[in-house]
Image (tube, rainbow, N blue to C red):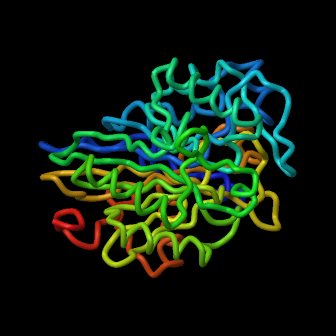
Amino acid sequence: AALAASGRSRLGDFEDPLLDRWPALGPGEGALLFGGDMLLGDGAAAHMKKDGDDWQLRRIRALLAGSGAVAVLANQEGPITARRRSSGRGGWNYAQDPKTAEVLAKAGFTHLSLANNHAEDRGLDGMLDTWTALRKAGIHPLGAGRNLAEARQPAVFDVGGARVAVLAGIQAWHRLRKKKWNATADRGGLNFLDAEGVRAGLAEAKAAGSLVVAFPHWGDNYSPVTADQRAIARRLVDAGADVVIGHHSHDAQGWGVVDGVPVFWSLGNLAFGTPGRFGEDKHQPGTGLLVRMVLRDGAVDRFEVVPLQINNRLSTYQVEPLRASVARAVLMDLAAREGAAVEFVSGLGVIRPPRSAPPKGE
């Protein structure tokens, strides 16, 4: 049981391979790679100081570097700033060393969402420090900016015969509205996914791309899919989203379909500097997901999924891919939660879109 929980096996690599490589893309195919919540440092700071700043990402470097994706996207949880004064919010309060941006760039991240509930833990200035540090390192920040126009601006990619626009945003929680974390025409902040934010944001994304991916921060920590997530997903789909890929719950929530649109409710953590709360048993495995969205002939052909071990009580703050046998069981469990389907090709989870049709509205 302990071996299974750790993602390791008594079998040899040939019989039970570690899922640390992606299959080659086919002719005419292109891809985008999506990961969940990231926080470098915090509980991992001692390891980073002793063994290198890339400590947390070292065991997934092959997956990040070898995806063949035109962009690697994730959620940057918490500010990258030297500021020490917190915003006064209760609970967890984060800040990461300014050199974090360079570490992330060297690891291969190209686009990071700042639309999350820790973005302004060091105030608006701390969020703007993060925005500036990422841009300086060559990473494009999403979902936040110096004004609403920047916060709503989608990232646009030409990939697999499609022009894909990715819109990042955050559930408009009352506590964040009260603190005025939302961006306005003349104030920096985050892209809130309230009714107006969804309508205007999706309209801009649809004008920029033929296929729109919504990348929301939503739901509750370490919890099943919430009613609010389902309501926001329907709002996003009704406004024209062709794919929805979410984050925030810290543990993966699986995937489903809303009116013919594939929805990944939460990818869980990618590399996160806290121990993690994965059930009552502190040694219960937690799962994060790396999702490669493969496009061909202007449409989504498939989603390839690699589950990750993210429980830092087991892996000493090094996120790691699972072996194929354990990954299969994990993905089958996640699929069953929403009555969804998953195939397995060479141990890799493969999810087919519900229809091989042009994007919504065409």
* Residue 116 shown left or right of residue 179 in the figure: left
Q: Quadrant of the N terminus?
A: bottom right
* Residue 179 shown left or right of residue 360 in the figure: right
Compare residues 264 and 345 and report the one nearer the observer.
Answer: 264
The answer to whether residue 227 is above or below residue 10 is below
Residue 326 appears in the figure = no
Question: Could you tell me residue 178's position as x and y percent?
Answer: 75, 57
The answer to whether residue 224 is above or below residue 180 is below
Question: Could you tell me residue 356's position as x and y percent?
Answer: 18, 67
Residue at 87%, 51% (x, y): give it.
90
Compare residues 322 and 307 and report the one nearer the observer.
Answer: 307
* Residue 87 shown left or right of residue 53 in the figure: right
Residue at 53%, 60% (x, y): give it.
193
Question: Which residue, as the protein is rendered here, is positioned at the far front?
Answer: 186
The answer to whether residue 150 is above or below residue 99 is below
Compare residues 53 and 70 and report the one nearer the observer.
Answer: 70
Where residue 242 sits, quadrant-wise, is bottom left
Where residue 219 sits, quadrant-wise, is bottom right
Compare residues 361 and 164 and report the one nearer the observer.
Answer: 361
Residue at 47%, 70% (x, y): give it.
233
Question: Could you tell me residue 97's position as x and y percent?
Answer: 72, 23
Residue 339 appears in the figure = yes
